[in-house]
Amino acid sequence: MSLQPLSTRSQAAGVVSPSQLKVTVHSCAAKKQRGEKITCLTAYDASFARLLDESGIDLLLVGDSFAMTAQGYASTLPITVEEMLWATRAVSRVTRRALVIGDLPYGSYQLSPRQAVKTGIRFIKEGGAEAVKLEGGRRRAAAVRALVEAEIPVMGHIGLTPQSLHAMGGYKVQGRSPEQAKQLLDDAAVLVEAGIFALVLEGIPAELAAEITRSVPVPTIGIGAGPQCDGQVLVLHDLLGLTPEPRPKFVRAYADLGAQVRHAAELFRHDVEGGSFPSQDESYHLGRTQASAAKQ
Ligand code: KIV
């Protein structure tokens, strides 16, 4: 079933159930207030975005993890704005219900708030995103403020921020010491004050994530941050079992598509090499008159 664009009239008349309503930054806030969990998955292309949207996932994050899952890079650092816009367009074209969030890639917002706004505007106008995400704590407050001034909803992202790979000295759980934990609590408060509508907490102890979640009015979306966040996000390729093992401990693979894809490709190779694919039924044929004309 493909979802049709939602009519505001039917929404207002209450003839569609809440699970069918278009997700907005405001409905995310309302979910936190009601104590309902928010679901978020990454999406990078139209075919998966359509399926995830039809599954009722609230937020589709066009994450810069695209660099690692689909482009084969070892980190998220090399991906460009143009490449992220390509993926964001593909996702936003087919998404009807979920909120589409574009991830600002490394180097596209760190230079100045003006640079952040210029990039953010491209994600909205050219990518069709409804919000953007950027990584970092207090150092990003001015950029967040400038984006919000430009009417662009911003999702923050603190803790293990993959774009800080070299500064962190590797992908390491953050916030284990009392000093680091305090810094992250302060970062969360500063970002909220700057105007974020939601906050990704990645790779931090569950106890700290719970404390941050209690301390901020905006929804927290956890990845490797324990069960007490207001929502959870996973990288789609991890969830589907498409990424090679070993996977991080916070990943739950809900399918083993990697094995299924390999198996399907092996069957195809077997049939082509053995001459059983395509069959006569799977081929187009000339009509009787065309066939006799072709013989002459
Ligand atoms: O790029 C990404 O996929 C992300 C999520 C892991 C939060 O930033």
Image: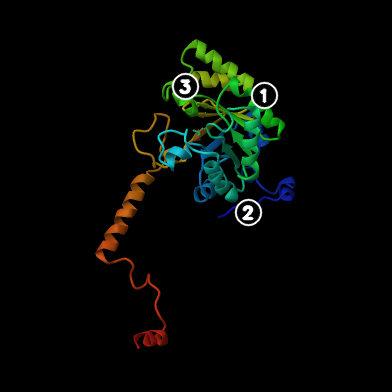
Q: Which residue is mark 2?
A: 4
Label 2 or label 1, whichever comes before in sequence order: 2
Callout 1 amino acid: Ala
CA distance separating discs 1 and 3? 24 Å
Label 1 or label 3, whichever comes before in sequence order: 3
* Up/down of 296 relative to 98, above or below: below
Badge 1 marks a residue whose secondary structure is: helix
Image coordinates for residue 210, horizontal then vertical, percent: 54, 21
Label number found at residue 167: 3
CA distance separating discs 2 and 3? 45 Å
Total residue callouts? 3
Image coordinates for residue 41, horizontal then vertical, percent: 51, 39
Image coordinates for residue 75, horizontal then vertical, percent: 43, 33
Q: Is residue 25 left or right of residue 268?
A: right
Give neighbour class at mark 1: few <14, some 14-19, many 20+ (Cα, 10 Å). many
Badge 2 marks a residue whose secondary structure is: loop
**Residue 206 in sight here:** yes
Which quarter of the rendering shows the N terminus?
A: bottom right
* Up/down of 56 relative to 182, above or below: below
Q: Which residue is mark 1?
A: 194
